Image: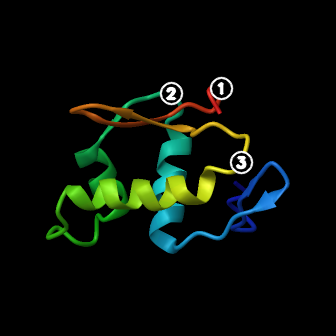
Amino acid sequence: MDLNLHTLRRGEQAIDLSKTEWDLLEFLLRHPKQTLTRQAILDYVWSYDCTVRPDLVDVYVSYLRKKLNLPGMADPIMTVRGVGYRLDIDHA
């Protein structure tokens, strides 16, 4: 993820993200191997909108997974049941 150029690559594959997907991935990358609660993710990604429901985090994690899960590569986003999500780059 190149923050200056606003580009993302996984392996040799360029990946296009929406602004919300970008913000979510950036937050996860800034906290590698740390379990982030849905509320913490909401506060960072949707700080401008206090009416957003927590299940929207799950929806956007699903969108992000679909884009990041390339053939032959493991899912880098781990679900921590009842808590939230963790980015595990070593796992990927």
Label 2 residue SS: loop
Residue 7 to residue 84: above or below: below
Q: Which of 63 and 48 is in front in this view?
A: 63
Q: Earlier in the sequence, mark 3 or mark 1?
A: 3
Q: Do callouts 2 and 1 mark residues in contact (Cβ within 8 Å)? A: yes
Task: Answer few, some or many: residues within 10 Å of disc 2's Cα (few below 14, many 20 plus, some between 14 and 19).
Answer: some
Label 1 sits on residue = 90
Quadrant location of the C terminus in the rendered image: top right
Label 1 residue SS: loop
The amino acid on which the numbered mark 2 sits, given as a three-letter code, is Lys
Residue 5 to residue 35: above or below: below
Dividing the picture into quadrants, the one containing residue 54 is: bottom left
Q: Position of residue 21 (x, y in %)?
A: 49, 64
Residue at mark 3 to residue at mark 1: CA–CA distance: 17 Å
Q: Of the numbered discs in the image, which one, if any, rests on residue 71?
A: 3
Q: Is residue 85 left or right of residue 90?
A: left
Q: Do callouts 3 and 1 mark residues in contact (Cβ within 8 Å)? A: no
Dividing the picture into quadrants, the one containing residue 48 is: bottom left
Residue at 51% x, 57% y is: 64
The amino acid on which the numbered mark 1 sits, given as a three-letter code, is Asp
Label 3 residue SS: loop
Q: Position of residue 39 (x, y in %)?
A: 23, 47
Q: Of the numbered discs in the image, which one, if any, rests on residue 33?
A: 2
Q: Do callouts 3 and 2 mark residues in contact (Cβ within 8 Å)? A: no
